[in-house]
Image (cartoon, grey):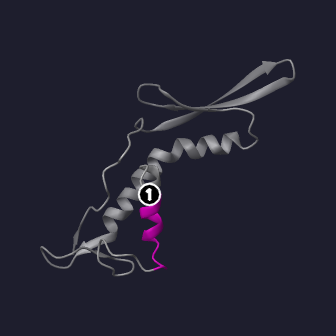
Amino acid sequence: MTPLTTAKQPVTTFSPGPWTVNLVEVQHADGVSLIAYIKADTGHREIAVLYNDEDRVANARLIAAAPTMLEALREIIADAYYVENPGGTPICTHCQELEGDPHDPDCSMQFVIAAIAKAEGRP
């Protein structure tokens, strides 16, 4: 079996990872607030700033993990298809559907494909 890369090229671009979370305490008249900054390690670009959200630290960590998770999903898809013979149509290793055909409703690859499409701004 020969692995085949089936991940589509991104429709949109984003600051390359890794991204990191920096937590900053800010003093003000009402007390102290914790602000979560998400920055790209390359170019030190600010990705997001989360204020006044009780889940801001967990949300910031999830946002910062996005580039790594997207790359992992692309690798999963690349490994999920194989070609039985040269020139043949790639087949999903999970549900045995041909590439381009709808996956079996129980096939986890449909969720991976949908997550990649959402991250790339595709329907």
Q: Specify the segment rendered in magenta.
A: 105-116
Which quadrant of the view contains residue 90?
A: bottom left
Q: Residue at x 64, y 44 (%)?
A: 59
Q: Which residue is mark 1?
A: 123
Q: Residue at x 47, y 54 (%)?
A: 118
Above or below residue 28? Residue 49 is below
Classify residue 8 as left or right of residue 16.
left
Which quadrant of the view contains residue 52?
A: top right
Which type of secondary structure does the marked residue at label 1 adopt?
loop
At label 1, which amino acid type do we have?
Pro
Q: Quadrant of the N terminus?
A: bottom left
Classify residue 71 as left or right of residue 19.
left
Viewer-side residue, 54 vs 11: 11
Above or below residue 88? Residue 41 is above
Q: Please, which residue is most extreme toward the front here?
A: 123
Reply yes or no: does residue 83 show up in magenta: no
Q: Residue at x 60, y 43 (%)?
A: 61
Q: Please, which residue is most extreme toward the right here?
A: 30
Viewer-side residue, 114 vs 84: 114
Which quadrant of the view contains residue 97?
A: bottom left
Q: Residue at x 26, y 73 (%)?
A: 82
Dot 1 surroundings within 10 Å: few (below 14), some, or many (20 or more)?
few
Residue 63 place in picture, x, y as percent: 56, 43
Above or below residue 16? Residue 74 is below
Q: Quadrant of the C terminus?
A: bottom left
Residue 108 place in picture, x, y as percent: 47, 72
Residue 77 place in picture, x, y as percent: 36, 64
Instruction: Look at the magenta stretch and give its main secondary structure.
Output: helix
Residue 76 place in picture, x, y as percent: 38, 63
Above or below residue 82? Residue 96 is below
